[in-house]
Amino acid sequence: MIKVGIINVTGYGGAELARLLYNHKSVEIVEVTGRSMAGKSLREVFPHLYDIDIDIKESISQKCDVIFSALPHAASAEQIKNFVDKDVKILDLSADFRLNNLNEYRRWYDTEHPMPEYLDDFTYGLTEIYRDEIKNSNYIANPGCFPTSILLALIPALKSKLINPPLVIDSKTGVSGAGRKLSLNTHFSEINENVKAYSVFGHRHLSEISQESNLIDDRFENKITFLAHLVPMTRGILTTIYADYNHDLIKNSDQLIYIYQDFYKDSPFIKIVEEPPSTKNTLGSNYCHIFPYIEPNSDKLILLSCIDNLVKGTAGQAVQNMNLMYGLEETEGILDLALYP
Amino acid sequence: MIKVGIINVTGYGGAELARLLYNHKSVEIVEVTGRSMAGKSLREVFPHLYDIDIDIKESISQKCDVIFSALPHAASAEQIKNFVDKDVKILDLSADFRLNNLNEYRRWYDTEHPMPEYLDDFTYGLTEIYRDEIKNSNYIANPGCFPTSILLALIPALKSKLINPPLVIDSKTGVSGAGRKLSLNTHFSEINENVKAYSVFGHRHLSEISQESNLIDDRFENKITFLAHLVPMTRGILTTIYADYNHDLIKNSDQLIYIYQDFYKDSPFIKIVEEPPSTKNTLGSNYCHIFPYIEPNSDKLILLSCIDNLVKGTAGQAVQNMNLMYGLEETEGILDLALYP
Amino acid sequence: MIKVGIINVTGYGGAELARLLYNHKSVEIVEVTGRSMAGKSLREVFPHLYDIDIDIKESISQKCDVIFSALPHAASAEQIKNFVDKDVKILDLSADFRLNNLNEYRRWYDTEHPMPEYLDDFTYGLTEIYRDEIKNSNYIANPGCFPTSILLALIPALKSKLINPPLVIDSKTGVSGAGRKLSLNTHFSEINENVKAYSVFGHRHLSEISQESNLIDDRFENKITFLAHLVPMTRGILTTIYADYNHDLIKNSDQLIYIYQDFYKDSPFIKIVEEPPSTKNTLGSNYCHIFPYIEPNSDKLILLSCIDNLVKGTAGQAVQNMNLMYGLEETEGILDLALYP
Amino acid sequence: MIKVGIINVTGYGGAELARLLYNHKSVEIVEVTGRSMAGKSLREVFPHLYDIDIDIKESISQKCDVIFSALPHAASAEQIKNFVDKDVKILDLSADFRLNNLNEYRRWYDTEHPMPEYLDDFTYGLTEIYRDEIKNSNYIANPGCFPTSILLALIPALKSKLINPPLVIDSKTGVSGAGRKLSLNTHFSEINENVKAYSVFGHRHLSEISQESNLIDDRFENKITFLAHLVPMTRGILTTIYADYNHDLIKNSDQLIYIYQDFYKDSPFIKIVEEPPSTKNTLGSNYCHIFPYIEPNSDKLILLSCIDNLVKGTAGQAVQNMNLMYGLEETEGILDLALYP
């Protein structure tokens, strides 16, 4: 049994890790932390985790084989400092080790990086794209929820040079992406029956999206418009990507679907679907549904994708990465089908 | 592997059975039916079940070991007729075999019973109460969702004679309980941001609640007021039960909690919780949370309980019963923790 | 034009007052306060009030004819101190002047009353019941939202001695009743797709409900069980009241409806409806819908009522009271029909 | 008093007309129709309209000065046939008279136009753009809800040649836009906690958007990508428009805001706001909020707008047009501020 520790189990990402790992047959949760709730039992804070009989500690003290950090950026690296260069695998769910470029980190996260010298040691954990690197890595930077929904849809087109800049990416997210921290922007009466764009002058996740896109095709530098919208639901991200396409390579939607199916033929969690996807079709699951097509009236290539932001967008992808790091079946513990309706 | 057939997989109860049984390690889904969708693949109708590679048929033709019927009442018994007295176990999710009394069936369901001679062959599948009978039964009448949420909270008090008539039972349900059939009462714009009582002159489930209560304590005959309310959420039932209690037996809430904990000490899905339960704490899971207490201002005994109406209230309890019928671990395939938030 | 000041316009009650008073043809909003937002324009804080061109101040300084206080309890009385015994009418939306008994205030609100000597000067502003007293009063204690929904349904039965103790009152409220203050209990991801009971050991509004009931029929002292439930919607309260009734006075539902219609025949905002009411039927309006009936299976008298908690339950009833205080048409400025769907 | 008739009051558009017109001081509702509900009183069907004491008829028989048709396309023109060339003003809320080109009508609505010879007699009722034409017209084709939200945001930029093709328009709508007709796409359990794109190969409203855009700048022909998304709320449309802009004319967001404020300086319902707008800020009101800005990372011009689809997007704009046709104050009867929260 792999001994697992979860740092900051009291946020939504951490709680979701506990939910998934509890039923993972190769894993034992040996320690969970959550500063403000230290001393309480996990079930007091989260009655839905009643069967996980464990107390919340202030910090990880015991010997864990692998540590998941679900802290916010900066705070996460500060904690991770204590565990590097020891015989512990680390999966960081924060943004701290996602960006290769320190200036970009400083610009978007408005703070100095707490452990810049370790940036290169972390692999960007977009599982389906970096599967081999992840298998051989001890430290994983788990991608953001928006970048996961966007890059999984975008990368097959980028790698095959099917599309040309510029890109418009319009994402719609449920509210749990904003976490458990209180804010007027997540206050029920303000958000229910409401839709709005936010971070309109630049969402932090643009840095990840650009980094990964430019690595494949540098014509997209500064050519990606990304706008996030908050919709009144708890979980789920729907992403709509609008692009011009290369008419020499693509003649119709069928061809496009074929390319996508082929690209993901060995990826059990990615489904190239034949109808526009609904976020509800991936609720609570680690699946990503993608619908690529040619819009006939304006002759644009449109990519629609959906995920559950807390599973494939956060905790589920982290478990998937852990499975790879340990040579387990990629799907172990995260094969639950979506909850519908 | 137990070969399973699902009749009417295209409703919410049937789809939920497919979701749960797909990941049950002792089960293989060999056949699913759904008349209006016959000929289509399951994933066309339900993309969230993408990984279940099976076509929907018009009727069960193959050899199944066990059949779940998720048809509406009357239609269910009509289909079940074809499978009785053969070597097939049957779990009926409809109301057809729940009531012992044909007159009550006729009164509440306003139709003649299609197979009255089989009423006695079916065991009422309220798992935690009739566990032994279920283990020895081939035919199960799975309880209704409201009766499940109500009786699990009520029966410990009834059996210990803690409470006296009359009872007021006020339940609040999500909309999926009304099924997938279209109606103005389940039309999004009518139901969203809305709460109302319905079936105010008598909800069908009262017959089940009364039958089971009277079996234990016949002083409750015609002394139970049950009113169902529709709230704007998809899944979940919260039940509030108000009763007078026997002051000789109960002095305080702690004592009450102890009695409940003891009653359910061997029931892994029932949790006697220490805070008023939220339906979200059981979302997507087979758990039932119960909070019994004494309201100090009016000195009433109040029982609060919650379940997911489609899991513990329908498909999950049916799988739990199937596990018992086959001598499997009661929890097999249905141990998923709730999806929160 | 009546010159109006609103203290604490930045909460939901205050903002709703501004919305309603802006289109009231006999009123001019001359001053609004909101400490944390002082210095900002009202439209910066509430873009939906864009057309009200006024700045938020720290305190009321100008000459107003009437002041509405939308502060929380205790804070409200502290402010109101500055305006009593001047030529200003006062409508207090807080709980400070609702209870006649100081001990009850201390017990439920857990603080010393800031102006006990003025308790008698305030009239309990349940408009339809205390219309004449309100007309002759300068100071109004506007009722709580739950008491409004409950007492309007209950009082006709109490006054006609139709019902006997005990009473069970089960209310379901939207989240805006909890105000704009941040809390995990109003955090979108926690509340959406969720129902729960709260303040289960005693909700403050029980004190108001009991006081007013006992004034009419003291047999109800300590015989009222009131439990509030939070449902995932923004506005609206549905109340369900369960009672035993006097069979000498009531033979059937029709008779009951007649008594209610007669009781409210001169009350333009109260509708005795012929179907169980939906909260959505009163959304955004000052109406209260009541459905009284006899439940035939258990022979109980059930009263269903609904209101918009922020209009009839708060700001709308306050405006209705102001109209009476000034001899205006009772309905002026608050005749908007409900927003449906 | 203007005598008004409403054809098909039983849909959401018709019911909203009744709600708004009831409190319009220059109007009397003299007749309402709704075939399936003919014979019932309006309050039986819509308890929220309790105070409108009128019965639903099968057809308009009485002398009305103005008729609003809230029927679906084709059915609307069939009814309107009976009223043209009489002394009656007509406001059609359907799509029948919006498109100037019969082929476009046939292509998008897949039917022959019932009264093609009258196309030219109807004025496209986008109030703020065609105010003068509307004043002098007897027949109005009320715009679609998406085109209203889109064109009000787009036209100032088009008229000033600020933007260049192509355009990407991503709209998010509440469910009431799909009307009261039952469908799995508006079934609560399917839509709640869900977001999806629909009509992805071409939404009918594209024809209107293209027609009006091309009239101003024909470079946009076939250069507009419009994709509609369904979000889990009842009312509201948020539109996000992405465009390249003319750097000679626009240097920054402030300049853009100035141009928009100037364009709409005489339009009381259009607010150029300084924060990204929320649909909730226009809920239940006839206002449209627009936020134009330059996205700095990709140097795109983005237009965000929101309306209530049933008010400014349907019934409210129709009343606004009626006001102009009769020389009344443009805002009469529709000045209600939005319902928030």
Image: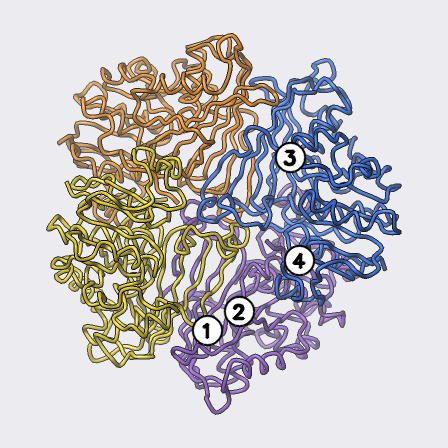
Chain colours: A yellow, B orange, C blue, D purple
Q: Which residue is mark 4?
A: C35
Task: Residue at 69% x, 14% y: name it.
Answer: C247
Q: Label 2 sits on what residue type?
A: Ser
Q: Is residue C169 left or right of residue D331?
A: left
Q: Tell me the crowding category of disc 3: few under 14, some 14 to 19, or many 20 or more residues within 10 angstroms, Cα based.
A: few
Measure the alpha-carbon separation of dots 1 and 4.
Answer: 38 Å
Local SS, label 3: loop
Q: Chain of mark 2?
A: D
Q: Label 4 sits on what residue type?
A: Arg
Measure the alpha-carbon separation of dots 3 and 1.
Answer: 53 Å
Q: Quarter of the image holding residue B143?
A: top left
Q: Chain of mark 4?
A: C
Nearer to the camera, C94 or A228? C94
Q: Which residue is mark 1?
A: D241
Q: Are marks 4 and 2 on the same chain?
A: no
Residue farthest to the bottom, as pictured = D248
Q: Dots 1 and 2: beta carbons under 8 Å?
A: yes
Q: Which residue is mark 3?
A: C110
In this rendering, which labeled residue sits more in front, label 2 or label 3?
Answer: 3
Measure the alpha-carbon separation of dots 2 and 3.
Answer: 47 Å
What numbered label is drawn on residue A49? none
Where is residue D302 drawn, in percent x and y?
Answer: 46, 75
Q: Chain of mark 1?
A: D
Q: Dots 3 and 4: beta carbons under 8 Å?
A: no
Q: Chain of mark 3?
A: C
Q: Which residue is mark 2?
A: D305
- Examine the rendering and report whether any part of residue A153 can be seen: no
Disc 1 or 2, which lies upstream in sequence?
Answer: 1
Q: Quarter of the image holding residue C218?
A: top right
Local SS, label 1: strand
